[in-house]
Image: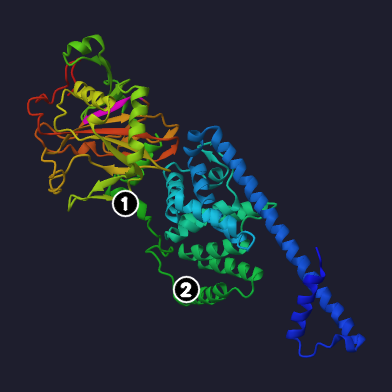
Amino acid sequence: MNLCHHTVPFLVYLCIVNVSCEVFTALADLEELLDTEKLVIDTLQNYIKAEEQKLELLKRYADFYQQQHNRATEDVQLYISNPINAYTLVKRLTTDLTELENLMGSQISRDFLNNITHFKQTRLFPTDEDLNGAAVALTRLQDTYRLDTSSLARGELNGIKYSSELTAADCFELGRQSYNNGDYYHTLLWMTEAEERLRDEANHTISQSDILEYLAFSTYKQGNVHLALDLTNKLLEIIPTHTRALGNKVYYEDELQKTTDTPKKKGDDESEEIQQDEEVHTAEADPYGKQHYESLCRGEIQLPPKMVAQLKCRYVTHNNPFLLIAPFKVEEAHINPNLYIFHDVMSDQEIETVKRLARPKFQRATVQNSVTGDLEVAHYRISKSAWLKEHEHKHIADIARRVEDMTGLSMSTAEELQVVNYGIGGHYEPHFDFARKEEKNAFKSLGTGNRIATVLFYMSDVSQGGATVFPVIGAALWPKKGTAAFWYNLHPSGDGDMLTRHAACPVLAGSKWVSNKWIHERGQEFRRPCTLERPPENLIV
């Protein structure tokens, strides 16, 4: 490289910006020029050092991305079915990628950035909404299954280690997403964990000042003004000129002064007023509400021994000549309402066909608006679904005929086969399959009456979680590949059976695939036996 060609323009630039540039007229000026040259050298060396640090950081990112990708490709389904892995994968392709793009924001890196922009336009990329959804799913799992924050950060789910540990930045992002959702409880949990992990990191993945800012305000929102002020002071020790912290400090001090000036309310016994837990009131108002539902999901509630003793397993033929050769294997899961489990009623080949046909059609699962009857997405149902017609494949037609054999009900007015795959922490909160009397527009367009019965096929095993639970009767059905659950939604009178309210528990580990066949009233007038008594051994009622 010829340095002269680069040095001359630089000196010319110096001459332009200086009022007097006749350096050759006095040696003193040349001495000063050496100082200028030293400044240039220092600046250049600092730039090189910064570029080297940037490259070193980019190398660490690349090595980490490659390490995680290698682990994922060893068993793709096992990797993505872990909610922690799923969250960090989405994070790597959203907030982490944004940091990489910022790091690569030089002229030299423009071509690489153009490539990433092209990939975002032509390939499947997660969005900020996906990241938020993944974070909410992890906190939902944390609450439902009572998972310790530190254990979850270590990659453990109920004591079983499934994935690599979360970094301080991963925990910070979980806290930040919770904060954005106004969930200050989980913000505190994850920001505290981020601070703990930051202490142990050789190469810090997040700054302590960022963690402290979220910790302080969330602590205030949770009602602890003293601690919020302490955390804010700690932040100001690191960044004394932090504008928001300075403003918050004054505000917290004013709040504490107001508290000091206002006498505390006392109870009748002169003790400090006790704050009632809102969840206690909720549990009293609805004994089969959220707490009860989550207890069922954790397997903490069992059927009474007296009922379990009455449950039977049997072969069912429905007096069908074909079924005399190959009867259904049926297990009773509950009596009144009667819940049945059919074993080995969907083959692996049929399952793969259903999955293959459903994937291209998947859309966010919807629920029916009770007022308008329109279908709409809902936060309490996290999954994707597709509908398959019998003519699309022989296997779909075979499944429909099998449902008719299983239930003894006509498929002439049954809905298409709905296929569902649950996402990260996927769930469906307690609901009814039938339309209640006030839901006058539900199924109106079908003209086939209400949903008389449900057949729910389990198309995958689920490592942890994912049960179908019935809160009012305390029953739980656990997914087993190839089985199907069956129950009547309506009484013989046509009224809805309120005991069939059920829910899909969040999937803790694994991938949950199910398919539904909803059977309607029309065409069943002479199919369903009009009896409330327990059915004969070879029939299902």
Q: Position of residue 118 (x, y in %)?
A: 50, 54
List the single residue furthest toward the right: 27
Q: Position of residue 282 (x, y in %)?
A: 31, 51
Mark number, residue 282:
1
Residue found 22% across the figure and 25% down from its top: 403
> Given the image, on which type of amino acid does mark 1 rest?
Thr
Is 223 rendered above or below residue 321?
below
In-front residue for pair 338/427? 427
Left or right of residue 186: residue 280? left
Q: Which residues are magenta?
A: 482-487
List the single residue furthest toward the left: 526
> Given the image, on which type of amino acid does mark 2 rest?
Thr
Q: Residues within 10 Å of mark 1 (few under 14, many from 20)?
A: some
Would residue 540 be counted in the magenta stretch? no
Residue found 75% across the figure and 62% down from its top: 49
User: From the image, which quarter does the C terminus lie in?
Assistant: top left
